[in-house]
Image (cartoon, rainbow, N blue to C red):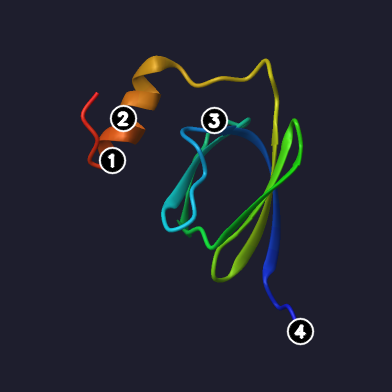
C-alpha cells in the first residue's frame, strides 16, 4: 500500500533531478522547494517528470516560458557546494 503524499508542481528544476540527491525546484509562484533525497525518477512526457522521495511522489510540469534568473541558479548550486 502506498501512503506517500502526491504533490503536483509547475516550475523548473534548477539542475537535473538525480537519484541519491535532493531536488531543487523553482515553482511558478516564486518559491524554491528543496526535496528530500530522490529515490526514483520517471519522465512522463516532454514537459512532465514524476519523481519519488521517501515520503512523497512529485509530478513536476515545466513551463517552457518559465526559467530561473542567473543569480538564483548560482545560489542554488552554491547551496549544493558547487563552484560557479
Dot 2: within a 10 Å radius of its alpha carbon, few (fewer than 14), some, or many (20 or more) residues? some
Quarter residue 70 falls in: top left
**Sequence-first disc among 1 and 3:** 3
**Sequence-first disc among 2 and 4:** 4
Rendered residue at 38%/25% (across/down): 72
Q: Nearer the viewer, residue 40 or 55?
A: 40
The secondary structure type at the circle numbered 1 is helix
Rendered residue at 63%/30% (across/down): 28
Residue 34, image x, y percentages: 45, 49
Q: Nearer the viewer, residue 72 or 52?
A: 52
On screen, 46 above or below 53? Answer: above
Q: CA distance from mark 1 to mark 3?
A: 18 Å
The secondary structure type at the circle numbered 4 is loop
Q: Are marks 1 and 2 in contact (CB under 8 Å)?
A: yes
Q: CA distance from mark 1 to mark 2?
A: 6 Å
**Sequence-first disc among 1 and 4:** 4
Say which residue label 1 marks: 79
Task: Decide if residue 50 is on the left or right side of residue 79.
Answer: right
Q: Nearer the viewer, residue 48 or 28?
A: 48
Mark in front: 1 vs 4: 4
**Sequence-first disc among 3 and 4:** 4
Amino acid at each position: 500500500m502506498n501512503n506517500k503524499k502526491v504533490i503536483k508542481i509547475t516550475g523548473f528544476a534548477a539542475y537535473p533531478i538525480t537519484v541519491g540527491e535532493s531536488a531543487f525546484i523553482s515553482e511558478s509562484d516564486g518559491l524554491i522547494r528543496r526535496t528530500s533525497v530522490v529515490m526514483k525518477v520517471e519522465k512522463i512526457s516532454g514537459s512532465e517528470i514524476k519523481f519519488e522521495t521517501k515520503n512523497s511522489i512529485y509530478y513536476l510540469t515545466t513551463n517552457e516560458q518559465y526559467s530561473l534568473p542567473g543569480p538564483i541558479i548560482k545560489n542554488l548550486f552554491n547551496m549544493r557546494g558547487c563552484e560557479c
